[in-house]
């Protein structure tokens, strides 16, 4: 059963966070409290969605003394309307594609029709993983507590695909942890995880960046630096 945690300390505060690092520390404190009081295994791994999720995930991984890895996701667009997502492909030792059956039906297409697009998007995933992680091995997730982290959620479409793909990889427990998200999106994602931790669900929910004082784009070199830092701590 999914449990939703909302930290009242952020209610009425605007912007909610100075930057992603502050949000990550607040999220880490809530996760430590939760993991310390229940039967969640003490062998967590943190999977961050790049690029914005990396500074948040670093703070969570530090606090939990957990490995930090990437969860790379690419949209699978409809050929004649690329901005419409028919699904998404998620990296891993066995990359997983997750499709939206409603979109497939509306377009009159089957999963197999998207193989060329999937191939291109998977190649882009591998290019980015090579850029960010070089030859570093993926963190294993089977039979572990997997904490998927991002800097926030808007519609939840990408995160939903990522969660479905991670679930197929056999984690013992799956947690979604984000600093901020709209209430409606949180409700739609609760069924995908064992626990959902969201620090605040402000109304109205503005653009994600409006909830941060500093929401500068995370550059590729910063992603590499963060991952190197996380690896060095555990080396």
Image: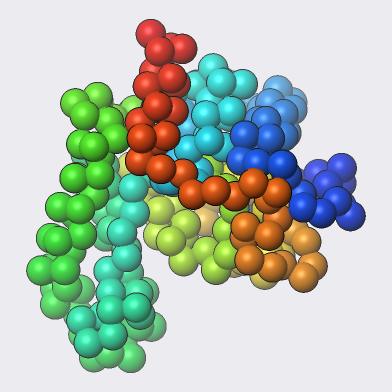
Q: Which color scheme does this rendered protein use?
A: rainbow
Residue at horizontal 39 percent and vertical 18 percent from the top: 231
Estimate the x, y position of residue 212 in percent, counting from the top left. Answer: 68, 50
Does the rendering let one see residue 120? Answer: yes
In this rendering, the answer to whether 180 lies above or below 81 is above
Residue at horizontal 68 percent and vertical 26 percent from the top: 32
Q: Residue furthest top?
A: 235
Estimate the x, y position of residue 139 in percent, counting from the top left. Answer: 34, 28
Estimate the x, y position of residue 168 in percent, counting from the top left. Answer: 34, 48
Residue at horizontal 78 percent and vertical 61 percent from the top: 202
**On the picture, is 210 further left or further right than 83?**
right
**On the picture, is 233 further left or further right than 203?**
left
**Res 142 → quadrant:** top left
Residue at horizontal 77 percent and vertical 70 percent from the top: 204
**On the picture, is 226 further left or further right than 78?**
right
In this rendering, the answer to whether 167 lies above or below 67 is below
Nearest to the observer: residue 21 or residue 110: 21
Estimate the x, y position of residue 203 in percent, counting from the top left. Answer: 79, 67
Nearest to the observer: residue 222 or residue 65: 222
In this rendering, the answer to whether 159 lies above or below 63 is below
Nearest to the observer: residue 139 or residue 40: 139
Does the rendering let one see residue 141? Answer: no
Quarter in which the C terminus is drawn: top left
**Res 220 → quadrant:** top left
């Amino acid at each position: 059963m999914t449990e939703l945690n909302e930290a009242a300390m952020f209610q009425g505060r605007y912007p909610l966070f100075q930057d992603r690092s502050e949000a990550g520390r607040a999220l880490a404190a809530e996760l430590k409290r939760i993991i310390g009081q229940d039967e969640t295994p003490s062998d967590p791994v943190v999977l961050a969605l790049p690029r914005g999720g990396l500074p948040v995930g670093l703070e969570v991984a530090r606090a939990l003394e957990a490995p930090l890895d990437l969860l790379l996701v690419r949209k699978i667009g409809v050929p004649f309307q690329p901005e419409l997502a028919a699904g998404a492909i998620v990296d891993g030792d066995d990359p997983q594609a997750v499709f939206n059956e409603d979109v497939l039906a509306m377009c009159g297409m089957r999963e197999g029709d998207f193989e060329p697009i999937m191939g291109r998007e998977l190649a882009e995933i591998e290019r980015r993983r090579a850029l960010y992680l070089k030859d570093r091995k993926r963190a294993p997730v089977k039979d572990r507590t997997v904490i998927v982290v991002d800097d926030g959620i808007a519609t939840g479409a990408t995160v939903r695909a990522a969660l479905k793909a991670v679930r197929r990889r056999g984690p013992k427990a799956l947690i979604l942890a984000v600093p901020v998200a709209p209430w409606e999106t949180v409700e739609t994602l609760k069924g995908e995880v064992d626990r959902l931790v969201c620090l605040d669900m402000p109304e109205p929910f503005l653009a994600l960046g409006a909830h941060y004082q500093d929401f500068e784009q995370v550059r590729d070199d910063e992603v590499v630096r963060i991952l190197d830092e996380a690896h060095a701590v555990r080396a």
